[in-house]
Image (cartoon, rainbow, N blue to C red):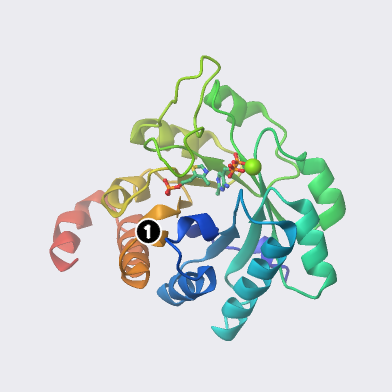
Amino acid sequence: MSIRKKFDLSAYFVVGPENTKGRSVAMIIKDVVEAGFTCIQIRSKVASARELIQLTREASEVIAQAGKSDEVVLLVDDRLDVILAAKQQGIKVDGIHVGQDDIPVEVCREYLGEDSIIGLSARTHDIFEYIKTVDVSQIDYFGVGPLHETMTKPDCGVDLDGKVITRSFEEISKIAQISPVPVVVGGGVKLIDIPQLAQTGVDGFFVVSAVSEADDPKQAAVDLVKTWKLYATVGCKDLIEKQVKL
Ligand SMILES: Cc1ncc(COP(=O)(O)OP(=O)(O)O)c(N)n1
Ligand SMILES: Cc1ncsc1CCOP(=O)(O)O
Ligand SMILES: [Mg+2]
């Protein structure tokens, strides 16, 4: 079965060489894959096309070595050219994430085919109306955020007036209810946010710095996955009892 039909967005790690404090991107990806993250996105605004292809290759190998090529998806941010080159070189890459000003999703679908995953960042302005009405026929999920302002992407959530709009848990719950496709939330997400985020009904969280800048990325990733699983799968009544066991 195509991975597009059964992928899991719950724990999503976005990373590039500018995020790792000089440490190996591949080693941190190995940590998060072993910790149980389900999606990996290669994203760099500084790496060359060839560096991005190499990072994609290394990520794909790390996922394969963990025996998780059929369950952990590997996406690349923005760069359809990089994905096409990687695929031509035999690298298993599962799709692309694009934003509102990036290459259109219809073009991505045409070049990547029906088995690839395409994620789209939701528009900031009038987000509820946008999510309810935009054509989602070519996309597999929405990226929504930020939860908090973030130095990793200072322009995330900038509205028409230039101000950053962050999303409350109430707004995120509403987005989860109205969205016709799965929703993943990121931007400033830290471990402390996970219990409330998991209870909003969204399909997952995405992080960069909570893992990539941690002293111990593996432990940070384990804590995020464990906490998400705990809070996403229980009802409010069970929470007090379960919290004791955290
Ligand atoms: C999962 C996820 N959601 C949102 C984004 C942001 O993408 P975009 O709006 O294209 O901005 P850049 O990441 O390209 O700066 C993302 N990358 N991943
Ligand atoms: C890639 C991206 N897209 C929206 S916010 C963001 C960066 C989130 O980084 P962090 O988890 O460090 O706040
Ligand atoms: Mg983009």
Q: What is the x, y in percent for residue 84?
A: 82, 60
Frontmost residue, 195 versus 27: 27
Secondary structure beneath dot 1 equals loop
Q: Is residue 113 visible?
A: no
List x then y, in percent, for residue 1: 72, 72
Q: Give the left or right position of residue 238, taking residue 119 as reference.
A: left
Alpha-carbon neighbours of circle 1 within 10 Å: few (<14), some, or many (≥20)? some
Q: Residue at position x 44%, y 37% from top?
A: 146
Q: Nearer the viewer, residue 108 or 46?
A: 46
According to the image, label 1 marks what residue? 213
Q: What residue type is disc 1 on?
A: Glu
Q: Position of residue 45 (x, y in %)?
A: 61, 48
Q: Is residue 232 above or below residue 22?
A: above
Q: Residue at x 70, y 56 (%)?
A: 48
> Which image quarter is the C terminus in?
bottom left
Q: Quadrant of ligand 1?
A: top right
| Residue at x-position 79% and y-position 48% | 108
Pick the front one: 218 or 202: 218
Q: How many marks?
A: 1
Indicate the position of residue 124 as horizontal and vertical percent values: 54, 27
Picture residue at 51% right of the left edge, 55% below the top: 18
Tell me if the residue at label 1 has its CB under 8 Å from ligand 2.
Answer: yes
When asked about the image quadrant of residue 66, the answer is bottom right
Tell me, yes or no, if residue 228 can be seen here: yes
Depicted 15 relative to depicted 128: above or below = below
